[in-house]
Image: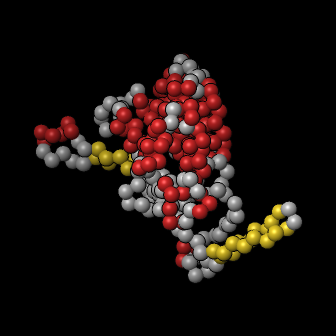
Amino acid sequence: RLLATLNSAAGAIPGDEWIAGQRVRYLLQSGRSAEALAAARTCGAAPWWCEALAGLALHVAGDYGAADSAYRAALDAMPPDERCRWTDISALLDGTLAQRYRRLPCDERGPFERRLWWLAQPLYSLPGNDRRTEHLARATMTRIERDARSTYGVLWGDDLREVTVRFGWPTYWTRSEPATLSSFADVPITGHEPVPAFHFLPDGSAWDDPGSASPQVWEPRAPRAREHYAPRYATAFGPLEHQVALFRRRDSCLVVGAYDVRSDTLFARDSLQAALV
């Protein structure tokens, strides 16, 4: 019924940004990502906003390469101040990295942000960078939520925006019974983000010299991480014992990697796909 109302409203006011965003949002919440993408592609609002909604739908559908392309188009067409808000990663950083980033004016932050997303990419064997598109999908959701009443019954604000940017938006909600009849109007509502979620950002030691970084600077299960992300394609991440050798071939070289997972129960009941990137 809600979606039917939104569809009618979109037909009557095709250029309304709020209606376009709510249509895509509720179609995605209903598990109808193909319809959400179709709604984004027929959106009549500002082109950058329609591209961002398409990026959101593609990301949720797991088409990260296409989502990356849609978000690049959206960012290119955005007003500069809006683009600065969407690409801002200060909420994800702490320590000296956060200080270095915040000292930069917005128009000089691009190289810093590109390096962060390169280091934080979960799997280089997948097209696109799903940690980056996740960040932009979260930015899209915060704008969709901005002018709507939140599920928690309070107005949207900077606090809820930061929580969403750091940890994602809830996939479901629960509510608790009030302690007394007098508190019935204040029923506690809890949002639950996707799990399992992982921390893909490395610590600062990998920043200036990635080539010398050890695997230990990435701690996916860090207990107090400033951010996390739950990829839809994986339920666990772990180190892989391996050997790598380089063989010179005139003006190039041959790279060979070897590993053995026969005794690893993580791979016992599933297929194996490997990539050297």
Give how far across and how far down residue 89 sits, in percent: 48, 41
Extreme residue toward the right, this view: 250
Total marks placed: 0
The answer to whether residue 78 is left or right of residue 167 is right
Q: Measuring from the top left, give residue 17's x and y in whole percent.
A: 52, 24
Please report the residue visible at 56 percent of the width from the left and 43 percent of the height from the top.
112
Q: Is residue 164 left or right of residue 131?
A: left
Query: Could you say which is closer to the camera, residue 197 or residue 171?
Result: 197
Above or below, 145 relative to 12: below
Residue drawn at (34%, 37%) of the image: 159
Residue 98, image x, y percentages: 44, 45
Q: Quadrant of the N terminus?
A: top left
Residue 109 versus residue 205 in the image, above or below: above
Q: Is residue 177 visible?
A: yes
Colour scheme of the rendered structure:
secondary structure
Please say whether residue 60 is visible from this viewpoint: no
Question: What residue appears at the point 55 percent right and 65 percent down from the top-left corner?
Answer: 214
Which is nearer the eye, 249 or 266?
A: 249
The front one of 133 and 12 is: 133
Q: Residue furthest top?
A: 12
Q: Is residue 97 above or below residue 154?
A: below
State the residue in front, 149 or 261.
261
Q: Position of residue 178 (x, y in %)?
A: 18, 45
**Residue 163 sits in quarter:** top left
Quadrant for the C terminus in the image: bottom right
Point 45% across, 59% down: residue: 196
